[in-house]
């Protein structure tokens, strides 16, 4: 398994600093996103981590380090209550799986994921591509939860990320701050694709400021609405984003039975 990460040393409103304890045991380092205590968002650094896996790929950032209070013009009132939302949209796709893989891989390698605008662009491009190809979206699932505490939001984001990543078997591509690493797929883990029964699962996990709600998926209109909600997240409110797709390696795809076995909560659109 190929994994790479960085840890944020940004301060929090409660004057905490330094590195957090590992959130994923020894397999991965934690993702930390904490508002900076300073009032100037442009002066605060960002850290990012991106990983991509066979039977899975991901782009990830350690999210925004900016003071929501000052950013939204409420001055220095530490008692101001903010809300945060963690959202997940998952889509089962069929058709030209290799083209999907190439397009997602192109996005993952094109941008430096420690840049806020670039990361938001990846989110927008992914949502747009899915909306333009709804005829190939056959299964879907949504989930979301609202928090009034940033630490709880972070914890939930990490939990959702880990839950999805545990379905992956081998890392084949990594993009950390623009540094690309690749390794060949173990051919013993997957046989050749046969016929037209070729599927891919794409998952978007977003943490954002504010309160957002996703519809329960019962058809394509619900999926369109859910993707539109993700697309409405602005760069200024985006806290964290992880894009995962599986399979990632060329020549690898799910059959429909394999897709539904790995993602049993997907609903037919």
Image (spheres, grey):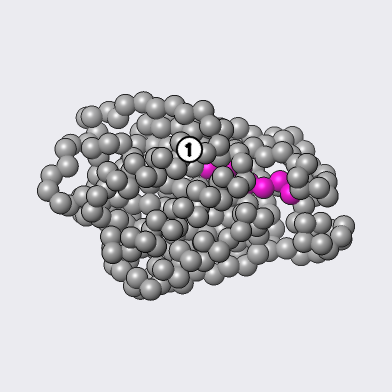
The residue at the point 67 percent across, 55 percent down is 236
The residue at the point 13 percent across, 44 percent down is 194
In the depicted structure, whether residue 35 falls above or below residue 24: below
Disc 1 target residue: 110
Tell which of 217 and 220 is nearer to you. 220
Instruction: Give left or right: position of 34 versus 193.
Output: right
In the depicted structure, whether residue 206 falls above or below residue 38: below
Residue 108 drawn at (x, y percent): 45, 40
Instruction: Give left or right: position of 222 versus 25.
Output: left
Is residue 43 among what the camera can see?
yes
In the depicted structure, whether residue 93 falls above or below residue 192: below
Instruction: Give left or right: position of 164 versus 118.
Output: left
Q: Which residues are magenta?
A: 60-66
Q: Main secondary structure of the magenta part?
A: loop
Outermost residue toward the right in this view? 76
Residue 50 lies within the magenta run = no
Tell which of 11 and 42 is nearer to you. 42
From the image, which quarter does the C terminus lie in? bottom left
Look at the numbered disc 1 and give the secondary structure of its residue: helix
Quadrant of the rendered structure where residue 105 is? top left
From the image, which quarter does the N terminus lie in? top left
In the depicted structure, whether residue 17 falls above or below residue 237: above
The residue at the point 50 percent across, 48 percent down is 122
């Amino acid at each position: 398994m190929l994994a790479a990460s960085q840890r944020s040393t940004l301060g929090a409103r409660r004057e905490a600093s330094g590195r957090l304890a590992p959130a994923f045991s020894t397999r991965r380092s934690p993702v930390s996103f904490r508002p900076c205590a300073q009032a100037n968002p442009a002066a605060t650094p960002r850290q990012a981590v991106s990983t991509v896996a066979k039977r899975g790929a991901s782009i990830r950032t350690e999210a925004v380090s900016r003071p929501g209070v000052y950013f939204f013009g409420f001055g220095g009132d530490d008692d101001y209550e903010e809300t945060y939302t963690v959202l997940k949209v998952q889509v089962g796709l069929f058709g030209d799986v290799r083209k999907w893989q190439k397009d997602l891989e192109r996005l993952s390698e094109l941008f430096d994921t420690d840049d806020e605008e670039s990361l938001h662009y990846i989110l927008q491009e992914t949502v747009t591509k899915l909306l333009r190809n709804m005829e190939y979206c056959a299964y879907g699932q949504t989930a979301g939860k609202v928090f009034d505490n940033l630490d709880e939001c972070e914890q939930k984001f990490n939990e959702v990320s880990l839950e999805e990543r545990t379905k992956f078997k081998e890392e084949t591509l990594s993009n950390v701050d623009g540094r690309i690493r690749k390794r060949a797929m173990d051919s013993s883990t997957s046989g050749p694709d046969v016929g037209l029964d070729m599927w891919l699962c794409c998952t978007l996990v977003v943490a954002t400021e504010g309160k957002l709600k996703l519809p329960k998926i019962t058809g394509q209109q619900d999926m369109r609405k859910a993707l539109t909600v993700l697309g409405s997240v602005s760069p200024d409110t985006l806290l964290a984003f992880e894009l995962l797709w599986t399979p990632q390696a060329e020549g690898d795809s799910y059959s429909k039975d394999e897709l539904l076995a790995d993602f049993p909560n997907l609903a037919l659109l």
